[in-house]
Amino acid sequence: MQTSLRLSLIALLLFGAMPYFAQTATLTPAQMRAKAKAQNVPEIPYEAVPNFLKLPPNLYLGEGIGVATNSKGHVFVYTRSEDTRLFEFDQKGNYIREIGEGLYGFAFAHAVRVDSEDNIWAVDEGTNMVIKFNPEGRVVMVLGHRPESVFGIPITPGFGAPPPAAEPYTFNRPTDVAWDPSGNIFVSDGYGNSRVVKYDKNGRYIASIGTKGSEQGQFNLPHTMAADAKGNIYVGDRSNARIQVFDDDLKPRAIYDQVGAPWAVCVTPGPHQYLYSSNSNPDNNNSEIMAVTGEVYKMELDGTILGKFGKPGKQAGQFSTIHELDCRSENELMTAEITAWRAQKIILHPKKQGSNGK
Amino acid sequence: MKLTRLACSLFTVALCAQSVPEISFDSAPNLLKLPERTNLGEVPGVATNSKGHIFVYTRTGVPYAAMGGSRTFTHGGSRLFEFDQTGKYVREIGQGVYGFLFAQVVRIDPEDNIWVVDRGSSLVIKFAPDGRVAMLMGRKPEAINVGGGGGRGGEGGGRGRGGPAALPGVGTPGDLFNQPADVAWDSAGNIFVADGYGNARIAKFDKNGVFIKAWGSKGTESGQFDTPDSIATDAPGNVYVADRGNKRIQVFDNDGNFKNQISNVGAPWAICISPGSHQYLYSSNSNEVNNLDNGEIYKLELDGRVAGKFGRAGKVMKEFGSVNEIDCRRANELYVGEIGNWRVQKLSLRQ
């Protein structure tokens, strides 16, 4: 009796003190699952640009869900505010305009991406739509269909119940969009379905891969996605804690499972491309898991880990559940963060560290 | 060619539809110039008036339900815009009116009155040319059930609200609609309402809105309907009903007596009849919102002979995304409203 009590007390003490022990071998089972497997990853020095985005009076960001830049360096932020809204800022962070004000397709932001022609694509998880705006900010293509209000509130399947069969042009809480060099469109879909769908540049269905599961080619929340210059697709298979790589025809090629749960991935442009992936701290602010997550990894496209940076936290330069990463510039990233209602500009200083320089 | 003719005479007319001539056409680029902060959503409704002004009834903004004590009150979600004949924005009509919930169609009568059919509020609203409400048909339900979900149209083509009826879809005699779909007029100004997604009937009213009669119920027989989705009249006053679920256009005389049906043009989502001495009937075999199948638009003689077809489902210009209304005030210059592509296209058909 006394022994077991003492053991409980020790367990309690350990649990309570866990943030201090997080970097040691003493991890809870939940922490063991959440912590990235990669060992001895070099830290990349970095800084955050203070107060980068300048919002007009009476305009506020809500949850920082999506962030992307265009070829001029303009910054697009897709946020869950009173309504879901999409804002554009210039390269210095000055506010320019709102895009898609009051749009029928905006209900619950999930990602914004800018393609090679500076079209702006918004992925809305609430309306089940992927919306393409031209650079002027006008809708030029939509994929998916908002459930019709005359049908009432959709019946939510019970927890664990399988979703209805996936259809070529209908999404079930889609998460992200990417394009290959010939303009084919890839949509990760998503929370309800567990697949990646490929369309041609005109929005015509070509193929899809994935069901719910943990085998290769299956997904457990495909949450984020990026393509490289060869058309390979990197899918952040978040709840399976792995990045799955597919070729342009959606054939599985590789799995990178050393970098935790990929909430947000991006691939840099240019002749030498890099892959960034955020093992974000959870959006339920669980301090136990927070203690072993929140860092962003920099990788070669083959999965070789080059370095990592970042810690979870509420202060500038710390990360509060990164939900999207923009890496149009290799060492000037943008983060959108759920639990801090912000987007940060992050400057990496890899040269100081040696092996990560250009 | 001979073989095709032989096939046409020997086999079904539907098979012949495969060999109807293609009509070449163009789509005007950048048709509508919207104000900076205004966006279209789904465009189920488009129509032109005698001056060529373009009226667009769109599902835009955010539809919402507000909680009441024991009911849910629904508001918003659709807007009506007017553009001039060059596509320049003129104005918004009916901003914030009680009945704009889930846009279905807009039609312009010979006196340039603007008629809106709203599927969500089950209303047919007549606006005078100045944009003021001139007559109201139907009543918005005090509470719209948003909790059940799933079933098509809530009542799924059932008995209709407002009282018991002998057959499913018959509705109540009068102008209490159940998700109405379209409106048309004859030369005397009588009003015909296709009603619709909830009921399955055609209701006829005089020009003052006094109920005359209704016909139809849910079914597949002649004079029955499975989603009467679009309606048009010709100069003698015959009534053409797009019986979408039954994949046919049924033709009735002015009193609702069945005359004949046209069944070789797919599922008619949207029909219109051009004016003038030689009238044509257009019908869109639109794609469902979850596929890109079909999508072609047929041009027919009023007797049902197919003169040609054009287009297909898709997302780029000159392709169609669930066309829900066609305006053919000019026989070879059409406007189509697309649910799937959130736009209006102006089409010029080449002869």
Image (spheres, coloured by chain):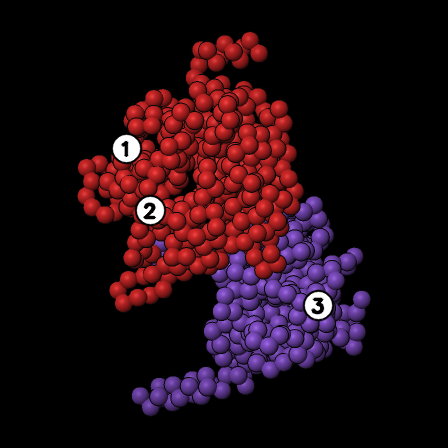
Residue at numbered disc 2: B137
Q: Is residue B298 above or below residue A355?
A: above
- Judging from the image, mark 2 belongs to the subunit labelled B
Name the quadrant of the N terminus of chain A. bottom left
Q: Is residue A86 visible?
A: yes
Q: Position of residue B72 (x, y in %)?
A: 32, 61
Residues B25 and A170: in front is: B25
Badge 1 element: strand
Q: Is residue B174 above or below residue A193?
A: above
Residues A334 and B297: in front is: B297
Q: Which chain is red?
A: B
Instruction: Decide which of tag 2 and tag 1 comes sooner along the chain.
Output: 2
Q: Position of residue A128 (x, y in %)?
A: 49, 54
> Could you say which disc has been placed on residue A261 in the image?
none
Please identify the quarter of the rendering in which residue B52 is found. top right
Query: Which residue is rendered at x = 36% and y = 51% of the image?
Result: B121
Name the quadrant of the C terminus of chain A. bottom right
Labels 1, 3: front one: 1
Q: Are marks 1 and 3 on the same chain?
A: no
Residue at numbered disc 3: A90
- Judging from the image, mark 1 belongs to the subunit labelled B
Classify residue A113 as left or right of residue B218. Answer: right
Name which residue type carries label 1: Trp
> What is the spatial separation of the Cα atoms under label 2 and label 1, in whole angstroms?
18 Å
Do labels 2 and 1 touch, CB within 8 Å? no
- Judging from the image, mark 3 belongs to the subunit labelled A
Name which residue type carries label 2: Met
Classify residue B149 as left or right of residue A290. Answer: left
Query: Which residue is rendered at x = 56% and y = 76% of the image?
Result: A58
Residue at numbered disc 1: B215
Q: Is residue A181 above or below residue A240?
A: above
Q: Which tint was used for chain A?
A: purple
